[in-house]
């Protein structure tokens, strides 16, 4: 059986994800190798992501390795992938989803509500920043870049009173010692696709795709497709103040979504249920646009909300 080569970013979390997929493939009898590929997003670490403005900042170089045949598949955090893949690529699998919510992480405080006035809160995300500011105007929100270990170390060295991270990354790396609270989606709506792993392959590569079919989870595929349909309709990427979380409720999907001004002065929320993932995502996006989301997004980018702005 031919060796399958996985392309991955080099962070601790990215390698955990790649090895997680590799282990499952090895259990099926495959030989697997992992090639570490450094992306633009990994190289530009001192600038807030929203200011970088590079499309596919965490995926472009890995996709180039796919094109060149240096790797056979790529393992990504789904929230890093543009909602519309470039021609020549497809998602062969979306694996069972880890906890998609955001987490409150602190050495000193057990709950977000316990933070004192002017407490320093670190986040790399404009989406999280906007929602923090909407909840607590009295807090000092500071930018936070780096991998999970780097962010936790900055917290331990008292550069921040608290930080907000994806619960999925903390759980995958077993770094839950300072995880104090999981935010509900009604309080802190997570990023579209958060907690899900996506396996990308060359379009039409039936042989590789066939090896990966067993990894595809129908529930994760449905919920993330719904979230990404909303993001696509709003024209947003992973670094815009848009949150979306879909959950299976029997045979129905419940989609909650948020669009917010970066300063938290205006926050729009919408929730609907439906059975068709793509149609539900589009319907919730349309409701947000009618409520004023287009004006918020135009303010941020100076572009119509319908113009795709991918990370």
Image (cartoon, rainbow, N blue to C red):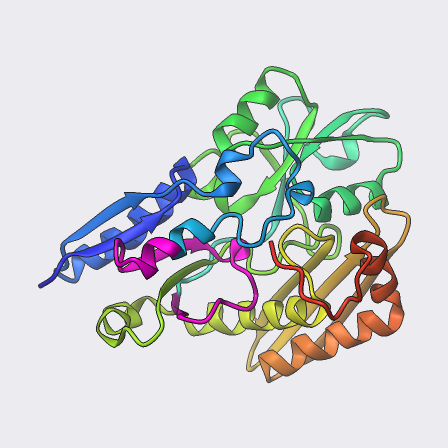
Spot the residue most to the left. Answer: 1
Left-right relation of 178 to 267? left
Left-right relation of 180 to 139? left
Which percent across, then down, holds residue 156?
Answer: 58, 19
Which percent across, then down, holds residue 292?
Answer: 88, 66
Spot the residue most to the top. Answer: 157
Which percent across, then down, holds residue 61?
Answer: 42, 49
Magenta includes 87?
yes
Query: Which residue does the image show at 61% across and 67% down from the upper left?
Result: 227
Q: Measured along the vertical axis of the image, is residue 288 above or below residue 108? A: below
Where does the magenta region start and end? 64-93
Query: Which residue does the image show at 50% across and 67% down from the upper left?
Result: 85
Left-right relation of 117 to 18? right
Query: Which residue does the image show at 52% across and 26% down from the upper left?
Result: 150
Query: Which residue does the image show at 66% across and 75% down from the upper left?
Result: 281
* Residue 87 at least partly seen: yes
Q: Quarter of the image containing the N terminus?
A: bottom left
Magenta includes 115?
no
Total marks drawn? Answer: 0
Q: Nearer the viewer, residue 206 or 103?
A: 206
Q: Measured along the vertical axis of the image, is residue 242 above or below residue 248? A: above
Q: Nearer the viewer, residue 31 or 174?
A: 31
Q: Nearer the viewer, residue 182 or 291?
A: 291
* Residue 176 at least partly seen: no
Which percent across, then down, holds residue 9?
Answer: 40, 43
Splitting the image into 4 quarters, where does residue 72 fall? bottom left
Splitting the image into 4 quarters, where does residue 288 fall? bottom right
């Amino acid at each position: 059986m031919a060796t399958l080569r996985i392309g991955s970013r080099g962070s601790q979390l990215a390698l955990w994800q790649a090895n997680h997929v590799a282990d499952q493939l090895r259990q099926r009898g495959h030989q697997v190798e992992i090639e570490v590929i450094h992306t633009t997003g990994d190289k530009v670490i001192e600038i807030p992501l929203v200011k970088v403005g590079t499309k596919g900042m965490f995926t472009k170089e890995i996709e180039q390795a796919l094109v060149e045949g240096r790797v056979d598949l790529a393992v990504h955090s789904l929230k890093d992938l543009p909602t519309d893949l470039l021609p020549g690529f497809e998602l062969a699998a979306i694996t069972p989803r880890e906890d998609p919510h955001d987490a409150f992480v602190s050495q000193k405080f057990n709950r977000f509500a316990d933070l004192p006035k002017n407490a320093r809160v670190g986040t790399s995300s404009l989406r999280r920043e906007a929602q923090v500011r909407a909840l607590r105007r009295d807090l000092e929100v500071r930018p936070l870049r780096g991998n999970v270990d780097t962010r936790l170390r900055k917290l331990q060295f008292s550069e921040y009173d608290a930080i907000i991270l994806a619960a999925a990354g903390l759980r995958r790396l077993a770094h839950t010692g300072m995880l104090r609270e999981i935010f509900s989606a009604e309080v802190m709506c997570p990023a579209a696709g958060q907690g899900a792993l996506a396996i990308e392959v060359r379009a039409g590569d039936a042989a590789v795709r066939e090896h990966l079919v067993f990894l595809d989870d129908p529930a994760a595929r449905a919920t993330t497709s719904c979230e990404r349909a909303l993001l696509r309709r709003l024209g947003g990427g992973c670094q815009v103040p848009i949150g979306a979380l879909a959950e299976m409720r029997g045979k129905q999907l419940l989609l909650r979504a948020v669009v917010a001004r970066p300063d938290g002065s205006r926050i729009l929320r919408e929730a609907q249920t439906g059975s068709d993932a793509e149609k539900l995502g589009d319907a919730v996006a349309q409701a947000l646009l009618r409520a004023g989301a287009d004006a918020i997004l135009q303010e941020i980018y100076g572009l119509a909300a319908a113009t795709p702005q991918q990370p």
